[in-house]
Image (cartoon, grey):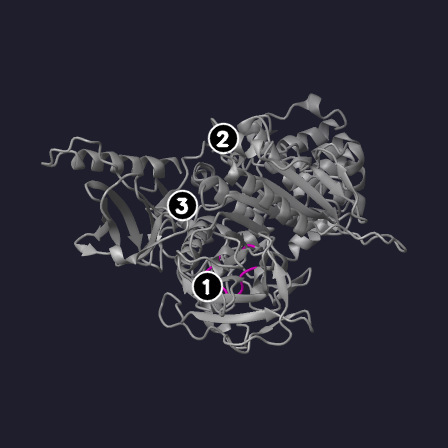
């Protein structure tokens, strides 16, 4: 947020100069008020309103006066308990707005930029077509949000109250806001306040999304929500829950995420957060399963957070929460749009989406090679070539996202169930008819459903095809290399495998030749931040949490946590702000009286301690990273937790040393088995010629066949990816496809 501070400083100095030029004979220094936008960045204001905070300078004479252009908006400001004046100011025009804030002769000019509440702000031209789904979004009372009222999918805001019952131990609709039910439970917050367990749930629309936020609020005892109000239940902390999965979009979505969906329903997943006083926020466009565009997610998260602050006031901090695709968003937003999230707790984590696409899509190619080969492949050999904990993990990827992430044609899979969550694995929504979908012959201008088409604004257009540029590449990749060198597959298996894997066409269909990525895609995926460089992740606390699957199929392989750490180490030289916690998914042994640790509760508690320590630390540090590390809670280190809740504190080791490495080993993925680095961020490898001395087990004819497979050479993973570029900057905005500019 450096640019934000500089901007306000410039305005303040200008105001001092103006105030000192008046005709008064009083030569005493003019005290200038401090003013700032607290609901968003000053250049990210939306919906025509913003919460403004003003601090009166010590000794300043006169009363506050605030002018928005020629309109006096002073009456919007109310005093707060800490001596500031806070106001929700409305009436901003789209574009630049100037506010003149004065106490006597001291004046400050605050400049902000307002945007349409329907967006876009930074994500670029709206994706089309767009399916509105407000009529599918279920509310607590059994109804829905109702039909959309315009092309931006807006619907009336719904506010409801629910409470925790002492009888059923579940949440029920509050019958009346003027009386209490007999079975009303109480809860104690992190501030030590015992309050009635009544939750206010607000559901509305903005940025073509459906948002929802929930917080303890007693309508009989608490003040009506306002930016300057004080509350008994809310602990003034936010948890933003990001939803999982990943799709190409074209939809508003009617669910928020595996956890926060329950805010409108039984609330079991978020009960601990709400009970402790946290406000829980989420939206349909911060669930990657509705639209896997992390810039759109960052934009929407900023707008939802802004809407909450306009309603309830500024929080102490905002914590990121969420698994799988939700973890991708947390990592990417923290790195590319710093300031939205103050700390993140990624679960079942991935560093980003587009660096995992290669080793996910590889499962389809490996499966084709195994099943069409005349050679015998055991399940053990398939597992080792894939690198995953079991070959069934590749099968699970194939049953969900591959090759679909690469396929331009529309498919129509039925809704699926993954670990109890109902997910739509279709990359385009079922509401888009097959006739409107892409077909290379019948409808070449139809809707394309691959992931790259979903982020065309961010990745750009391939001049050769006219479609979104694609980043998948496997030229030079020697599948099974480490397994071959270890003697676990034969020379003939190794050569035949690489002869048969092939690749994908520009439409995502299988082909015999390897796939070559678009240079445009490669450059933009790196430079614009879709491949997470991690260069800014060292400035916030990170607790990476995951349930270890053992040998059961699970696409959330644990090595991904170490890939993020490896990138942090490369960029910062250390990862002291990064904690990896692994929890056993197994039940305690029969007859055991032990209770497994509540992993989510533990992470919530530790991240709260960490962020509050940072907030309360008045010391001066040279860097943000130093402040983070200095306030890390004592005893919070890498660890694995057994099924009986025993903590084993050990640094997470990719070589599986120590006790944790024995009971919860890390595995690899197809690209790592092919020699790829732990950072797992090489989309297209640099090439070196095939060297016979590297393959002592190959006959002359097998070596000749291998050279035929790799006429331009094999991967040299000691070098950075082709197209790799430094991150262009944070807070990038996309005025057109493939063009990124710094937000001004």
> In what element is the residue under mark 2?
loop
In this image, 298 relative to 683: left or right? left
Q: Nearer the viewer, mark 3 or mark 2?
A: 2
Q: CA distance from mark 3 to mark 2?
A: 45 Å
Image quadrant where residue 663 sits: top right
Measured from the top left, where is residue 45 in percent x and y? 34, 52
In this image, 382 relative to 425: left or right? right
Give, as a single range, the part of the protein colored magenta. Answer: 246-257
Q: CA distance from mark 1 to mark 3?
A: 23 Å
Q: Is residue 357 visible?
A: no
In this image, 676 relative to 8: left or right? right
Q: Main secondary structure of the magenta part?
A: loop
Give the residue at mark 1.
252
Q: Earlier in the sequence, mark 1 or mark 2?
A: 1
Evaluate if marks 3 and 2 touch, with contact meaning CB atoms under 8 Å apart. no
Give the residue at mark 2.
619
Measured from the top left, where is residue 599 in percent x and y? 69, 50
Mark 2, Cα crowd under 10 Å, few <14 / some 14-19 / many 20+, is few
Q: Nearer the viewer, mark 1 or mark 2?
A: 2
Q: How many marks?
A: 3
Q: Earlier in the sequence, mark 1 or mark 3?
A: 1
Give the residue at mark 3.
460
């Amino acid at each position: 947020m450096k640019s934000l501070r500089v901007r306000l400083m410039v305005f303040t100095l200008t105001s001092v100069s103006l105030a000192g030029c008046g005709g008064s004979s009083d030569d005493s220094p003019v005290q200038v008020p401090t003013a700032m936008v607290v609901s968003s960045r000053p250049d990210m204001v939306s919906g025509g309103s913003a919460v403004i905070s003003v601090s009166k300078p010590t000794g300043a004479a006169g009363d506050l006066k605030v002018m928005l252009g020629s309109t006096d908006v002073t009456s919007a400001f109310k005093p707060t308990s800490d001596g500031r004046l806070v106001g929700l100011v409305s009436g901003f025009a789209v574009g630049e707005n100037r506010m003149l804030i004065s106490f006597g002769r001291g004046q400050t000019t605050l400049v902000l930029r307002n945007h349409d509440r329907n967006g876009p702000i930074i994500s670029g031209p709206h994706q089309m077509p767009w399916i509105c789904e407000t009529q599918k979004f279920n509310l607590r009372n059994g109804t829905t949000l109702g039909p959309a009222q315009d092309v931006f999918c807006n619907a009336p805001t719904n506010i409801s109250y629910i409470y925790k019952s002492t009888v059923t131990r579940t949440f029920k609709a509050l019958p009346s806001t003027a009386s209490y039910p007999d079975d009303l439970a109480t809860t104690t917050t992190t501030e030590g306040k015992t309050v009635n367990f009544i939750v206010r749930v607000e559901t509305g629309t903005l940025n073509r999304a459906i948002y929802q936020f929930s917080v303890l609020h007693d309508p009989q005892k608490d003040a009506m929500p306002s930016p300057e109000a004080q509350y008994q239940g809310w602990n003034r902390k936010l948890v933003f829950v990001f939803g999982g999965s990943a799709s190409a979009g074209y939809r508003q979505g009617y669910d928020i995420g595996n956890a926060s969906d329950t805010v409108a329903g039984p609330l079991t997943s978020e009960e601990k957060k709400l009970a402790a006083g946290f406000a829980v926020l989420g939206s349909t466009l911060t669930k990657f399963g509705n639209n896997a565009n992390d810039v759109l997610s960052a934009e929407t998260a900023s707008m939802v957070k802004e809407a909450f602050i306009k309603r309830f006031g500024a929080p102490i901090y905002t914590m990121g929460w969420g698994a799988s695709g939700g973890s991708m968003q947390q990592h990417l937003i923290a790195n590319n749009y710093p300031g939205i999230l103050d700390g993140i707790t990624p679960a079942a984590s991935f560093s980003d989406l587009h660096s995992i696409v290669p080793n996910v899509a590889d499962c389809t190619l490996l499966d084709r090679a195994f099943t069409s080969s005349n050679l015998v492949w055991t399940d053990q050999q398939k597992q080792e070539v894939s690198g995953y904990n079991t070959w069934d993990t590749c099968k699970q990827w194939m049953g969900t996202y591959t090759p679909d992430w690469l396929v331009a044609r529309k498919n129509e899979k039925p809704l699926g169930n993954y670990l109890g969550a109902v997910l739509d694995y279709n990359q385009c929504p079922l509401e888009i008819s097959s006739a409107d979908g892409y077909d290379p012959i019948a409808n070449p201008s139809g809707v394309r459903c691959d992931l790259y088409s979903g982020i065309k604004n961010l990745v750009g257009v391939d001049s050769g095809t006219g479609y979104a540029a694609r980043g998948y590449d496997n030229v030079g990749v020697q599948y099974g290399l480490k397994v071959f060198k270890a003697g676990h597959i034969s020379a003939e298996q190794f050569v035949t495998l690489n002869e048969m894997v092939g690749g994908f066409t520009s439409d995502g269909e299988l082909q015999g030749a390897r796939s070559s990525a678009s240079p445009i895609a490669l450059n933009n995926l790196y430079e614009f931040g879709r491949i997470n460089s991690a260069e800014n992740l060292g400035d916030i606390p990170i607790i990476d949490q995951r349930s270890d699957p053992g040998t059961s199929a699970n696409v959330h392989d644990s090595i991904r946590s170490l890939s993020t750490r490896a990138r942090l180490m490369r960029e910062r030289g250390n990862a002291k702000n990064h904690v990896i916690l692994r929890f056993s998914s197994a039940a305690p042994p029969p007859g055991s009286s032990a209770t497994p640790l509540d992993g989510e509760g533990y992470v919530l508690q530790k991240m709260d301690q960490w962020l509050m320590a940072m907030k309360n630390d008045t010391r001066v540090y040279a860097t943000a990273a130093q402040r983070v590390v200095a306030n890390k809670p004592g005893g919070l280190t890498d660890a694995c937790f057994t099924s009986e809740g025993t903590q084993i504190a050990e640094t997470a080791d990719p070589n599986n040393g120590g006790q944790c490495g024995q009971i919860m080993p890390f595995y690899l993925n197809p690209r790592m088995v092919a020699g790829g680095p732990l950072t797992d961020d090489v989309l297209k490898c640099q090439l070196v010629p095939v060297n016979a001395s590297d393959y002592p087990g190959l006959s002359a004819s097998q070596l000749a066949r291998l050279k035929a497979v790799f006429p331009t050479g094999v991967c040299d993973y000691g070098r950075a990816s082709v197209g790799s570029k430094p991150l262009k900057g944070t807070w990038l905005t996309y005025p057109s496809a493939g063009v990124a500019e710094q937000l001004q």
